[in-house]
Amino acid sequence: MAALLEVNHLTKQFGKDSKALTDVSFSVQEGEFVSIIGPSGAGKSTLLRCINRMIDASGGEIRFQDHHVMDLKKKELKQVRTKIGMIFQHYNLVNRLSVIENTLHGKLGTKSTWAGVLGLYSNEEKKQAIQILNVLGLNEMIYKRADQLSGGQKQRVGIARALIQNPRMLLCDEPIASLDPNSAKVIMDHLKKVSTTMGITVVVNLHQVDVAIKYSDRIIGINKGQVVYNGSAKALTSEDIQRIYGSEAEDLIFDIGGIHAG
Amino acid sequence: MEVKEQLSNVTAPSVHLLGKRIPAKPLNKAAIVTRLTLFILAALTVYAFYSFDYKELDFMDALLGTFANLKTIFLEPHLKHFSFGHALYQVMVTLGLAFLTTLFGAIIAVLFGLMAAENLSSRRVSIVIKSMVAFIRAVPTVLWVLIFAVAAGLGSTAAVIGMTFHSIGYLIKAYSESFEELDRGVIEALQASGANWWQIVFQAVIPSSITYMISWTFLRFEINFAVAVAMGAAAGAGGIGFDMFMASSFYLDMREIGAITYFILAVAVILEIFAAKIKRKLKTV
């Protein structure tokens, strides 16, 4: 299988001497579920945003499908972005609009400026939105305003907005960091389902190592802007975790043996 | 170990304060400047009252005279030089002036407001527009009308242009600040899905800030109504303000001034009620 996403020697520098990413290389196969873990400030979010160029990297190469993402012009970049859905920690919905309107926002990238400005969506698009919302269990919330939803429901709307793009890949930036354990599980289950049943590649930033091990095919560990682990979730040892999280990892509040046993 | 050291560092400075009176606010440079300014202002006020030229005026007499005038104005109003219908028509003219200038101002201000909002445009453009707005707002509306009167002549044209100009400045500031309230993440989310600037503006930015925009616009409409009354008198822009000017400086008819004042008051109250209703409705939607 060909790699859907390939990142080679990526570096990102903020200002003069603060390096967020140094020489990051990895590739992601079609349909894979990849988690990126690492301590706060390690560069996980920066890395994710470099992939769809919400942040411009300072050096290296990113290939998505057959596009060299870093060389794309504005218009081509928008086209590539329509193929990459993004999910955020704080959901980033328009609070005053309804669930279905927020979902349909995912279609804006493929519409003409005028149709987008006036909010003219075709019936097929609306049908697709309702279908996706049904799958995510939001069928009764369709006309509710986004600010009336709970966190878990908001995040599901976020997933719906990404899925309506018909994406090849989902980038998830800490999707469960603001959720309670139950909603977090629902969200992770949905993401896993998206990956296995729809064949969409999922790259997700996570803080919870146990969740990463449980759900992902592969884990990429990042510390201080460098890849320190890149391998299957099953093979992750406590030494690896120590390398990813630094010396304090000994005191981390979970028990790795227990996770693998479960 | 480290933690303990830090803890002792935190407690150390407060130990020497025990027993002394503890000031709630530290006496720093800002506090001294504030106090000094207040003291100078107080001293100047006392000196000003002391040094007024009272022209042998008896304070009690003056006060009673003023009350007598107020009584004539407000308790014995009448219309002498024009009819009720004419007055109503003139109020409509004034309202029209306020409406037109607010409408023009709002339309232009939306566009520039978007460019002035830092999260929607570049920093440089935002700074340029904001500093121009600060300049426009610093000059009072009346002065803008008089400036434009040089080109357009005193009258309604100058009033419309001048009032629109100041409304634009006011509304750009109000709009751009409510646009900036929008969470950066929402814009980021739509950008990440490939949406363009105009789509983001109309699908996320304006729906999120529409209530602020409407209440700011209505506030400006109320201001413009008051200014339009003054412009009728000062710039000959017509409307009820001009009638008031005639009644006060031409006919010297205090009772008519009273009647006109009641007219303006009634309109202002109606506007206020209307605004409150709109705002309540917007909150529930």
Image: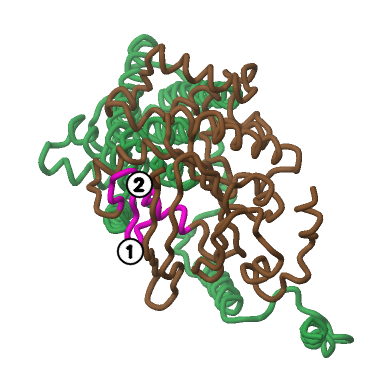
Chain colours: A brown, B green
Give the percent coordinates (x, y) of residue B262.
48, 23
Q: Residue furthest front?
A: A1
Q: Residue at x 23, y 36 (%)?
A: B235
Q: Residue furthest left?
A: B151
Indicate left or right for B213 with B18 as reference: left
At label 1, counting other C-alpha atoms closer than 10 Å, the crowd grade (few under 14, some 14-19, many 20 or more) is some
Q: Compare residues A228 and A102 and report the one nearer the observer.
A: A228
Magenta extent: A46-69
- Disc 2 on helix, strand or loop? strand
Mark 2 surroundings within 10 Å by alpha-carbon count, few (fewer than 14), some (14 through 19), many (20 or more): many
Residue drawn at point x = 79 percent, y = 58 percent = A257
The residue drawn where x is 51% and y is 71% is B44
On the image, which quarter does residue B104 sit in? top left
Front residue of A53 and A105: A53
Most distant residue in the right direction: B19
Whether residue B216 sits left or right of residue B80 in the image: it is right
- The secondary structure type at the circle numbered 1 is strand
Mark 1 is on which residue type? Gly
What's under tag 2, amino acid-wise?
Answer: Phe
Residue A64, numbered circle: 2
Q: Residue at x 38, y 42 (%)?
A: B191
